Amino acid sequence: MAALTELYREHQVGLIRMAVLLVGDEATAEDVVQDVFLRMQDKLPTLDDDGKLLAYVRAAVLNGCRMSLRRRKRMWRQVEPHQPPVWSAESAAILSEDRREVMRALQRLPRRQREALVLRYYLDFSDAEVSQVMGIRPGTVRSTMTRALAALAREMGEEAR
């Protein structure tokens, strides 16, 4: 339990930042990270390698974000099909206009491309680390990154117009 508490203290902020970039709002990101750590309390005895524990947590947060986005997508279909992402007042105040533009463009990318960009450029993961967290081959990471950067550039170009 102490190892889990220490891991939470050391990596909470970075994990929440990663989740914010993936889900688009701070409250949902915090919920995802907290849920991951709550679920890990039961699994901690089976995770004996401390070096792999952080990688496991990151992958769990990524999967939690995916589940959250799927739930949100179903909810949006029930409410309004073309409703834009909702930003909290706190998030809007924190993020500069440039960051908000990048965030909007990032949210329009396909899930896999968005995840790869966040892991590689925001969290500064190596291709091998991105590969491990996403469960794809390193070569696939590189091709996904190439497509993601091109798509982000297109999105940013369209948003500037």
Image (cartoon, grey):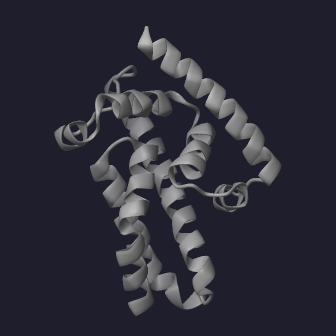
Of residues 73 and 151, the one nearer the viewer is: 151
Q: Residue at x 58, y 85 (%)?
A: 50
Give residue 13's quadrant in the image.
bottom left
Q: Residue at horizontal 57%, vertical 23%?
A: 153
Corner quadrant of residue 104 = top left
Residue at (62, 78) in percent of width and height: 52
Q: How many marks overall?
A: 0
Q: Is residue 38 left or right of residue 61?
A: left
Name above or below for residue 39 compared with residue 117: below
**Which percent across, then down, holds residue 48?**
60, 90
Q: Can the viewer see residue 113 in this picture?
A: yes
Q: Is residue 124 above or below residue 101?
A: below
Please indicate, yes or no, whether residue 1 appears anywhere in the rendered image. Answer: no
Q: Is residue 131 left or right of residue 74?
A: right
Residue 53: percent from left, percent from top: 56, 78
**Percent position of residue 4, x then y:** 42, 84
Percent coordinates x, y for residue 75 in the rendering = 37, 36
Q: Is residue 120 left or right of residue 136?
A: left
Residue at the image point whose x is 63% and y is 60% from the top: 133
Quarter of the image with the C terminus is top left
